[in-house]
């Protein structure tokens, strides 16, 4: 969302880069960005979601 507003940090850019290419679009309205992100997270299996969480939190490389 902050990328859309031009206020993104390096951390924000890294988070966007963890998403598949289809979900990285930051030129959409904020509602669509959030909806796409929620759809992606909902599509993850339990183990994939835990793996991504551990990677983001620095518990796993």
Image (spheres, helix red, strand yellow):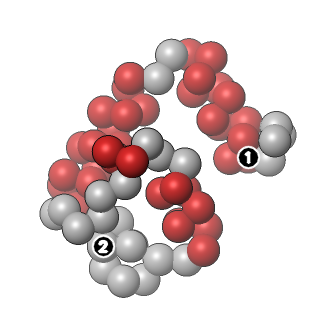
Residue 29's label in the rendered image is none
Residue at 37% x, 54% y: name it. 24
Residue 57's label in the rendered image is 1
Q: Using a 10 Å C-alpha cutoff, classify the residue at mark 1 as few (fewer than 14 neighbours), some (14 to 19) or many (20 or more).
A: few
Vertical comparison of 7 with 43: above or below: below
Q: Is residue 56 left or right of residue 12?
A: right
| Mark 2 or 1, nearer chain start | 2
Vertical comparison of 6 with 46: above or below: below
Vertical comparison of 10 with 38: above or below: below
x and y percent of residue 12 in the render? 53, 66
The front one of 14 and 57 is: 14
Residue found at the very far front of the displayed protein: 21
x and y percent of residue 11 in the render? 61, 67
CA gap, disc 2 and disc 1: 24 Å
Quarter assignment of residue 1: bottom left
Residue at 46% x, 23% y: name it. 44
The front one of 61 and 38 is: 61
Q: Secondary structure at mark 1?
A: helix
Q: Nearer the viewer, mark 2 or mark 1?
A: 2
Vertical comparison of 22 with 11: above or below: above
Residue tagged by mark 2?
4
Q: Secondary structure at mark 2?
A: loop
Q: Quadrant of the C terminus?
A: top right
x and y percent of residue 26 in the render? 30, 64
């Amino acid at each position: 969302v902050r990328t859309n507003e031009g206020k993104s940090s390096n951390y924000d850019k890294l988070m966007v880069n963890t998403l598949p290419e289809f979900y990285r679009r930051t030129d959409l309205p904020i509602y669509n960005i959030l909806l796409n992100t929620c759809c992606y997270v909902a599509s993850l299996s339990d183990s994939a979601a835990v793996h991504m969480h551990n990677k983001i939190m620095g518990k796993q490389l």
